[in-house]
Image (cartoon, rainbow, N blue to C red):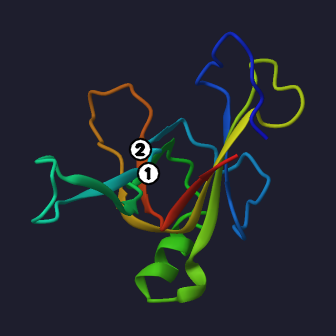
Amino acid sequence: MAVERERPYSQFNFRVEIENGPDAGSTRAGFQEVSGLGMEITIAEYRNGNELDNAPRKITGTYKVPDVTLKRGVIGDLETLYQWIDQVRNGSQEALRTVTIQLQSEDRSGEAVQEWALRNARPTKYTGPTLSGKGTDVAIEELVLACERIELR
């Protein structure tokens, strides 16, 4: 899936697709920002007591995926995200979904140039907008997702 080229891709053309969401394939639930994509592998140090070298061995341990944060302007739509948050809050195991973030080329021609698939994702935090009578900014809501695995393709 990843498309290689000499010049890096711009960060501003991307899509977020939530599996089994009411807006699958739609831009109605479009996000302005995605942050936190990554993975961390822990390393355990171990040294035998009779080891000739004084340095410990490095042994690959478990891995973890940090929480991913999605931000978007408030559009007054409760079906898209709120129902998903409500399912998770009420303990539904069917609420676990795959969320795919697709980086597009600048001209948006063809398929995604790279994808990040968040497996068994669920919302863990929702933050509403900061409201101010003196402000002129767009009202932004934030959704934090926890997932069990991230795959790049």
Position of residue 52 in the picture relative to residue 112 (left or right): left
| Residue positioned most to the right | 110
Q: What kind of residue is marked 1?
A: Val
| Above or below: residue 59 compared with residue 93 | above
Number of other residues with Cα within 10 Å of mark 2, as a class: few under 14, some 14 to 19, many 20 or more: few
Disc 1 is placed on an element classified as strand
Q: Position of residue 66 (x, y in %)?
A: 37, 54
Q: Nearer the viewer, residue 99 or 75?
A: 99
For the point 70% across and 46% down, which residue is it?
153
Q: Position of residue 54 (x, y in %)?
A: 10, 48
Give the labeled residue for mark 2: 36
Give the labeled residue for mark 1: 68
Mark pair 1, 2: CA separation = 5 Å
Q: Are marks 1 and 2 in contact (CB under 8 Å)?
A: yes
Position of residue 55 in the picture relative to residue 93 (left or right): left
Q: Quadrant of residue 32?
A: top right
Q: What kind of residue is marked 2?
A: Gly
For the point 16% across and 60% down, which residue is it?
47
For the point 67% across and 10% down, which residue is it?
7
